[in-house]
Amino acid sequence: MSRFNQKIVVNLGDRSYPVYVGEQLVRDLAQHIPSDVGKVAIVTQESVGILPELEIPSAVVYMGSGEHAKSLDTIAMLCSRFASMGMNRRDMVVAIGGGVVSDTAGFAAASFHRGIRYGTVATTLLSQVDAAIGGKTGVNLPEGKNLVGAFWQPSFVICDISSLDSLPQREYLCGLGEMAKYAFLGAEGLEKLPLVEQVAMCVNIKAQFVEDDEREGDKRALLNYGHTLAHAIEALGFEDSRLDFRHGEAVAIGLIFAAKLAHRMGRISSQRVLDHYRVVESYGLPSRLPVKVEPDLVIGVMSKDKKSFGTLTFVLDSPSGVEVVRDIDVDLVREVLVEFMDGLSG
Ligand SMILES: NC(=O)c1ccc[n+]([C@@H]2O[C@H](COP(=O)([O-])OP(=O)(O)OC[C@H]3O[C@@H](n4cnc5c(N)ncnc54)[C@H](O)[C@@H]3O)[C@@H](O)[C@H]2O)c1
């Protein structure tokens, strides 16, 4: 039986690029490096453990792990290394890793010599279905996440499912959380497919969003389905160890909450809410908070936008798909939150 292997093109005119989804693809990395590239800087992390051989001159540059490594200090370190390698505008950066590596190496490539080419080998499930595609590169500041960056599209993306074999289980689960949202963004029946086809389906959808809205106007915001509550859970988790969720796990809880809110607003049926539970639970993801949290604390974090005081914005489902819904009454959100936490200990 032939292996599943799909090439999906993100069509952006002269910034178009292929995304390859399949198994055992990393070993073919060399054939995706354009023939005019003279040198390659491979940016990765020790824990990724994937280093394909290249015939052209190359050097491996290791960066740190975690959000703190996604920093301007790392950009300075990477660009210095590129300079000491004598890299010029014809050369290329190859990011091998998850979203932290592709965001950081992509931004270093966008900045070095005012922009050189980069390609990504995405080695986490989250980066394969989301972070590696779309050209959003950047780093964090002490003041906040992803505050400095650039839209800089890669030359290619490789999503090799085999590279996920070594991924820690919690990281895998985190990717499933981002994957679950696609089931409500047009990938009906996603969870029933083999993993490699699920990744390809998500990449296809993400590619369409990027093509329609390269610089993140309204349409790409729909990719944040489930993220309004998720961001609040993650923020509160810094202070409250009972809310120790990874991003994807928080998104899963956020999807269920968004479905309940949409149902309460008469936008979707109770069957559709059950569909959300089915998808989230089939991935082994959490569908509820573990403990009661003060609703106003959650609302406070969700309503960071001072201009919309008294109202909230959510991405919500409807019979014609998910939409950005603004000006949702805070009292209604509070009521649905209270119901959502009913029966939990506090
Ligand atoms: N640019 C975008 O559009 C976009 C979208 C979503 C998320 N992001 C960003 O992505 C980041 C999160 O990415 P992530 O979830 O991939 O986490 P990550 O990059 O931190 O990777 C998680 C851990 O897994 C390790 N790892 C990676 N591949 C491995 C492998 N194959 N085997 C063993 N270990 C491996 C990494 O070294 C790291 O320790 C966040 O910074 C987020 O802001 C960006």
Image (spheres, rainbow, N blue to C red):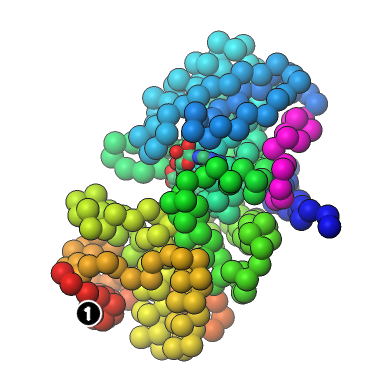
Identity, as a three-letter code, of the amino acid under mark 1: Gly
On the image, the x and y values in percent for residue 111 come to 53, 28
Please say whether residue 12 is visible from this viewpoint.
Answer: no
Compared across the picture, whether 141 is left or right of 106 comes to left
Q: Residue at x 51, y 20 (%)?
A: 79
Compared across the picture, whether 140 is left or right of 107 comes to left
In which quadrant of the rendered view does residue 89 lie? top right
On the image, the x and y values in percent for residue 110 come to 56, 31
Q: Is residue 95 above or below residue 221?
A: above
On the image, the x and y values in percent for residue 158 come to 67, 43
Compared across the picture, whether 34 is left or right of 291 comes to right
SS at mark 1 in the image: loop
| Residue nearest the viewer, comparing 139 with 99 | 99
On the image, the x and y values in percent for residue 241 come to 22, 53
Q: Which residues are magenta?
A: 21-34
Q: Is residue 76 above or below residue 117?
A: above
| Residue nearest the viewer, comparing 163 with 227 | 163
Q: Residue at x 56, y 14 (%)?
A: 83
Circle 1 residue: 343
* Residue 296 falls inside the magenta stretch: no
Q: Residues within 10 Å of mark 1 (few under 14, many from 20)?
A: few
Image quadrant containing the C terminus: bottom left
| Residue nearest the viewer, comparing 221 with 236 | 236
Image quadrant containing the N terminus: bottom right
* Residue 30 falls inside the magenta stretch: yes
Q: Residue at x 66, y 67 (%)?
A: 193
| Residue nearest the viewer, comparing 320 with 160 | 160
Q: Is residue 32 above or below residue 255?
A: above
